[in-house]
Amino acid sequence: MGFIGFNSNATAMNSIVLPFITLGFLAGLAQPVADRALPLPMDESPLHVATAGMTLHAATAEWGQIGHYTTGRVAKEYLDPAAWARIQEILDGDSFEEATVYMDDVRSDDAYDSYADWHWVTIPDGMTYDQTEKNPNGDILAGIRQLTAELKAGGLTPELEREKLKFLMHLIGDIHMPLHVGTGEDMGGNQVRVTWFRETSNLHRVWDSDMINSRQMSYSELAEALGSVDASTIAQWQAATPEDWAMESMSYRDQVYDLPEDNRLGYEYRYKNFDLVRLRLLQAGIRMAGVLNEIYAR
């Protein structure tokens, strides 16, 4: 507190300035750690950035960059050595973890507009994917099927194989974010306005980035914190189909939409739901490794 003076002029000035400084300092202390100068998600596409009027776009956001990087770091630990060697050749020096966000990076390029709807799928309550009316532009399940088949078939140019591999890695992460399997009523939670630690947000963004960013962990720290599972669990998770992954995401709807009346979210909501975030990130990484092993470990 060296700014406090002891001469009459300084004392008069401090009587004016000090209360404002003190109030500002105490206000800062009153803020939750998660609410103090946290960076916005690095992916600031229009899908993530809600305007003051909550203008929303026709597609849905996905795991933020930290979430996607985390799935990549987990997957790397479960890759067969032969698959890992082949993937390194295909990526040709590109980072494996960064490859998981490539499909978001190219969204600003009009040449990729045809893939916009591949990030999500609509399955209303009480229905299966097979019972739904399919999006003529494709969806996340159709995309995963198509990319897996094309990569297995081979015969692609190096550039095309690299791109399709990155797309597949991204979509496997996306489908494990519960709100990527939407009801068709609120754009996967994008239209559900909430307050996250006193900041305007929406339910999709809370699951996409807000909960993860509020832990202030790097993706490598988060991946390590997810822990590991036994061999039988790995086998069980990897035996599930992409349709199973989607139905799992649907099964968490009651939990995801269990909101207080005022839609003000913070520590309690994170406490109730962060274990599910951890589970889905771990499953996404382990299943990504399983799919890539199936394609390249041969």
Image (cartoon, rainbow, N blue to C red):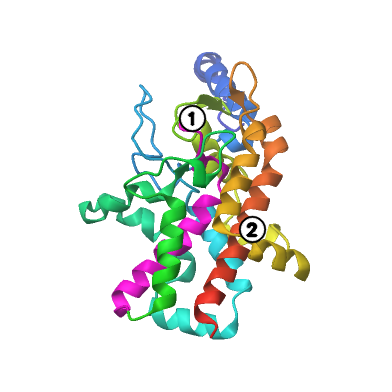
Mark 2 Cα shell of 10 Å, populated few (<14), some (14-19), many (≥20): many
Q: Amino acid at mark 2?
A: Gln
Image quadrant in which the N terminus is located: top right
Give the x, y percent position of residue 69.
Answer: 51, 60
The label on residue 187 is: none
Instruction: Check if residue 204 falls in the magenta segment.
Output: no
Verify whether residue 164 appears in magenta.
Answer: yes
Q: Quadrant of residue 102?
A: bottom left
Q: Is residue 230 visible?
A: no
Among the 4 quarters of the image, the one containing residue 23: top right
**Local SS, label 2:** helix
Residue at (54%, 64%) from the top-left corner?
72
Across and down, in percent, residue 92 comes to 38, 80
- In front here: 116 or 17? 116
Give the side of residue 50 with respect to residue 175, left or right: left
Tag nearer the camera, 2 or 1: 2
Q: CA distance from mark 2 to mark 1?
A: 26 Å
Q: Is residue 251 above or below residue 227?
A: above
The type of residue carrying mark 1 is Ser
Instruction: Please provide percent x and percent y for residue 149.
Output: 43, 69
Q: Earlier in the sequence, mark 2 or mark 1?
A: 1
**Residue at x 70%, y 30% (from the top left corner):** 268
Residue at image mark 2: 283
Answer yes or no: is residue 191 visible. Answer: yes
Q: Secondary structure at mark 1?
A: strand
Which residue position holds label 1? 201
| Vertical relation: 264 (above or below) 81 | above
Q: Magenta part of the protein: which range?
A: 156-185
Q: Which residue occupies the extreme left position in the image?
A: 110
Q: Residue at x 65, y 58 (%)?
A: 282
